[in-house]
Image (tube, rainbow, N blue to C red):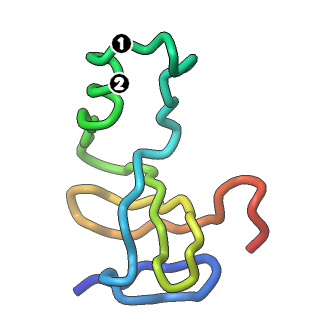
C-alpha cells in the first residue's frame, strides 16, 4: 500500500484517493464544435509517460482536488500542491 500526501489533510492511505486527470491537459473547446473522435480521445486516451508526471487527484474524505507530482515508474512521490487558486 502506498501513502499519498493530501495538502489539506496530510499523509493518507492511497485507497482514499481517486485519479482525476493529467495535469495541464486542456479540455477541447468550444464543446459544441468538438467532433466525437476528438471528445473520445480527450476522455479515453491518456499519455501515460514514463518518469516524472503531474496529475490531478481527488482526496475523497475531504473532497479536495490537488496536483500530485510522482514518478510513474518507481512510484516515488515528489510532492503535492493545492490546485492554483485553492488555499491550503
Q: Which mark is residue 77?
A: none
Taking the image as shown, residue 59 lies to the left or right of residue 74, namely right
Residue occupying image coordinates x 59% and y 71%: 64
Mark 1 neighbour density, 10 Å: few (under 14) some (14–19) many (20 or more): few
Q: Secondary structure at mark 1?
A: loop
User: Going by the image, does 40 lie left or right of 54?
Assistant: left
Q: Position of residue 41 (x, y in %)?
A: 28, 26
| Residue underneath mark 2 | 39
How far apart marks 1 and 2 lie (CA) works out to 6 Å
Q: Position of residue 1 (x, y in %)?
A: 22, 86
Q: Nearer the viewer, residue 50 or 37?
A: 37
Query: 31 above or below 56?
Result: above
Q: Position of residue 50 (x, y in %)?
A: 24, 45
Residue at image position (49%, 10%) is: 33
Q: Report crowding for label 2: few under 14, some 14 to 19, many 20 or more residues within 10 A (C-alpha).
A: some
Q: Residue at x 36, y 61 (%)?
A: 19
The reply, left or right, for residue 7 in relation to residue 2 is right
Residue picked out by circle 1: 35
- The image quadrant that residue 80 belongs to is bottom right
Instruction: Identify the residue at horizontal 48%, vertical 62% (top origin).
Output: 68
Counting the numbered discs, the total is 2
Query: Which quadrant: the C terminus?
Result: bottom right
Question: Is residue 30 positioned above or below 76 on the image?
Answer: above
Query: Observer-nearest residue: 30 or 69?
Result: 30
Q: Check contact, mark 1 vs mark 2: CB within 8 A.
A: yes
Residue 67 picture quarter = bottom right
Q: Residue furthest front?
A: 32
Disc 2 secondary structure class: helix
Amino acid at each position: 500500500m502506498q501513502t499519498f500526501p493530501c495538502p489539506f489533510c496530510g499523509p493518507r492511505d492511497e485507497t482514499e484517493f481517486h485519479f482525476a486527470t493529467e495535469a495541464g491537459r486542456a479540455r477541447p473547446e468550444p464543446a459544441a464544435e468538438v467532433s466525437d473522435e476528438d471528445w473520445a480521445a480527450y476522455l479515453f486516451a491518456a499519455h501515460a509517460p514514463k518518469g516524472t508526471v503531474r496529475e490531478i487527484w481527488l482526496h475523497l474524505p475531504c473532497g479536495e482536488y490537488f496536483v500530485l507530482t510522482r514518478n510513474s515508474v518507481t512510484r516515488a512521490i515528489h510532492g503535492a500542491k493545492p490546485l492554483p487558486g485553492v488555499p491550503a
